[in-house]
Image (cartoon, helix red, strand yellow):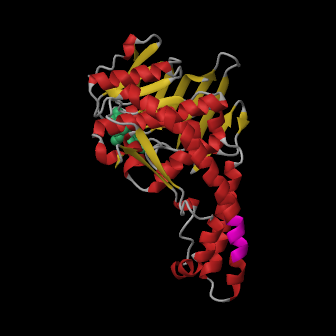
Amino acid sequence: MWLDRIDIRNARNLSAVSLTLSPKFNIISGNNGSGKTSLLESIYLLSCGKSFRTHRFSSIPMQGSLWMGVYAKLSSDQQRSIAVGLEYRDGKNIFKADGQRLKKASELANYLPVVAIHQESQRVFTQSPKYRRAFLDWGVFHVERDFLSAWQNFNRSLKQRNAALSQRGGRLSSVDHWNIALSQNATLIDFHRSHYLSRFMTLFNQCANQLLLLDGEITVDYRRGWSDKEEYLAVLRSSLARDQVMGYTQKGPHRADIVFKVNGVALHEYVSRGQQKLLVCSLYIAQAMLYSQIVGRGSIFIIDDISAELDSQHISNLMNLLNDLDTQVFVTTPADALLGGDLFPMTKTFHVEHGKVTEVL
Ligand SMILES: Nc1ncnc2c1ncn2[C@@H]1O[C@H](COP(=O)(O)OP(=O)(O)O)[C@@H](O)[C@H]1O
Ligand SMILES: [Mg+2]
């Protein structure tokens, strides 16, 4: 499935943009502040109802405008076209697909799975474990059916156990009930995560090898959130006193982390910024490949400012890998950068200037 047409109204500095897109490469070029990222942001909004730039949706509508909208026609080789749309007004979002109003924004992703790589993406390596857990769990959730319910049940029980821990006296007796509920779900979460990672790492290394030269294989240390040698139930029971002092459950899959390494050194401490960017791309491309292998559906890629921090050889490696993926791709780049995308068939180039987008013919 690919985006055939897109119409954007009043999203940041894009007042009225209507484009017919390439099912393969779409290169969006323009000067700083012209509206390139806003164009990608609009596509991403339509895929999940969220922005990759802000948590405050209210900052997205064009200043002075009371509403905004993004509408698209999705096409595929097998099925008829589907119209999807998103509108925001009076502080509320409305999502529609195929003539029906959707209950939740997350349902949009069923129509339009989009992977976005942008300025903040490198935090998956450099910042807190929550970003790595989010990355891992996105992958696991999409390929393991019972993962979501195990995760939801775990979190519900975790809240209950934490509440019981912080109550003096009485309810401590109920903690063991939550210990048992937690341990069943934790074991399942851990099993799925570790199984997913072993499949994922092969693809991750393959993608990384296509993009850059590293002098060693990438390995991952999966830290499940509690000792590898102990059952979670035993850990919960033995850490009761300490948990009570802290007032929350310290160990468990909610504290898991994955640390990528090259030659035993944490990846982000080993490689250059440009290499790290290529590894972020490898990470997301490998995840999309695995998703496509298992679920049978491709993802659309958007890469903001593809040329930043990369030399022409490495940009070309990345474009080649994306070309092999057989998926729709949107990339932005400064007006004067050369991407070599024109070398691939089915490339459309768009130029953005002060919020106006024109196709370069
Ligand atoms: N809500 C808004 N209304 C109007 N203009 C906005 C809004 N939010 C951001 N902008 C402006 O939109 C312009 C385009 O930004 P952006 O898409 O990030 O540019 P680019 O990625 O091409 O450098 C910027 O000049 C920014 O100031
Ligand atoms: Mg930008």
Q: Residue at the spot x=53%, y=22% of the render?
A: 327
Q: Is residue 225 above or below residue 3?
A: below
Say if the magenta span includes residue 95.
no
Q: Is residue 216 above or below residue 267?
A: above
Magenta span of residues: 176-182
Which part of the image, by quadrant, shows the C terminus?
Answer: top left
- Quick one: which residue is furthest to the bottom in this view? 169
Q: What percent of the width, then of the height, locates residue 237?
A: 63, 75
Q: In which image quadrant can residue 166 be found? A: bottom right
- How many callouts does the rendering have? 0
Q: Residue at the spot x=56%, y=37% of the render?
A: 199
Q: Residue at the spot x=71%, y=44% of the render?
A: 145
Q: Main secondary structure of the magenta part?
A: helix
Residue 276 visible from this viewpoint: yes
Which part of the image, by quadrant, shows the N terminus?
Answer: top right
- Quick one: which residue is furthest to the front in this view? 229
Q: Position of 36 compared to 308: left or right?
A: right
Q: Position of 43 compared to 144: left or right?
A: left
Q: What percent of the width, then of the height, locates residue 313?
A: 29, 22
Residue 43 visible from this viewpoint: no
Q: In which image quadrant can residue 69 be found? A: top right
| Nearer-the-camera pick, 7 or 265 | 265
Q: What percent of the width, then of the height, locates residue 325?
A: 51, 22
Q: What percent of the width, then of the height, locates residue 3?
A: 56, 24
Q: In which image quadrant can residue 309 be found? A: top left
Q: Is residue 298 above or below residue 107?
A: above
Q: Residue at the spot x=45%, y=23% of the render?
A: 322
